[in-house]
Amino acid sequence: MDFAGEDKAVYVQRTFDAIAEKYDFMNKVMSMGLDKRWRNLTVKQVGAKPGMRILDVCCGTGRLSLALNEAVGAEGAVTGLDFSENMIRIAEQSLSRAASPGSIQFVRGDAMELPFPDQSFDGATVGWGLRNLPDLRQGIRELARVVRPGGRVVSLDMAKPSLPVYREVYWLYFEKIIPLLGRILTRKAGAYKYLYESAREFPAQSELAEIFAVCGLQETGFRNLAGGAVAIVSGIKP
């Protein structure tokens, strides 16, 4: 993948800073309005309950963090972390408009080196973020490190459908249609070309579940969404 002479971390940060304003709108368009349902399923998968402390890494504009916040309630706490300053700014704006802000904070930080002590959280999520990390395994190990024993690490991200015809249509959609929509709606076609390329390189859901296990998580597995175009992958900290 071509990062225009930059390393992946710098390229990704610059790219997401550039598309932050239109990020939620494009997610809704690309998912055909299903993104909210997928986030709610992720909240259930991590087992968020009142009083829990949950970390949302690569939180972007904070939509998943806010959904987690509703689940943990006023007696719980959610921390959303992202390295894009513009994404964090929009997340904080969304929080200021929330009916029940609860106990939630957004911090700027690096998923490769989370600024939290071991076993700080009851669970951790990452939505649409693992494929953007320069070192996938290191990112998963960091998530596992900050979760308490018995807590879940959950990823919601692009996946690889296996059904013939649907698989071909899916990849055509991401290679041709999404960058076109990106150019028309956000004037950032390159950012959405990166989405296709990163999805192509990202491990299939079954392989990612195996990587979770290699990184020390147990009872790893995945749940396909949208016919395998998207998947929730999870594991439990022993």
Image: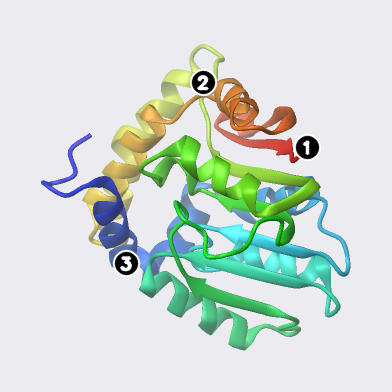
Mark 3 and mark 1 residues within 8 Å of each other at the beta carbon: no
Secondary structure of the residue carrying tag 3 is: helix
Residue 143: percent from left, percent from top:
60, 49
Residue 137 seen in the figure: yes
| Residue closest to the far top | 164
- Mark 2 Cα shell of 10 Å, populated few (<14), some (14-19), many (≥20): some
Mark 2 and mark 3 residues within 8 Å of each other at the beta carbon: no
Residue 81: percent from left, percent from top:
53, 65
In this rendering, would 76 be left or right of 201? right
Callout 2 amino acid = Tyr
How many angstroms separate mark 2 from mark 1 (CA)? 37 Å
Q: Quarter of the image holding residue 62?
A: bottom right
**Quadrant of the image containing the C terminus:** top right
Q: Which residue is mark 2?
A: 166
Residue at 45 percent of width and 66 percent of height: 109
Q: Which residue is mark 3?
A: 17
Q: Which residue is mark 1?
A: 238
| Residue closest to the far front | 117
Callout 1 amino acid = Pro
Mark 2 and mark 1 residues within 8 Å of each other at the beta carbon: no
Closer mark to the observer between disc 2 and disc 3: 3
- Mark 1 Cα shell of 10 Å, populated few (<14), some (14-19), many (≥20): some
Secondary structure of the residue carrying tag 2 is: helix
Q: Quarter of the image holding residue 218?
A: top right
Residue at 56 percent of width and 79 percent of height: 94
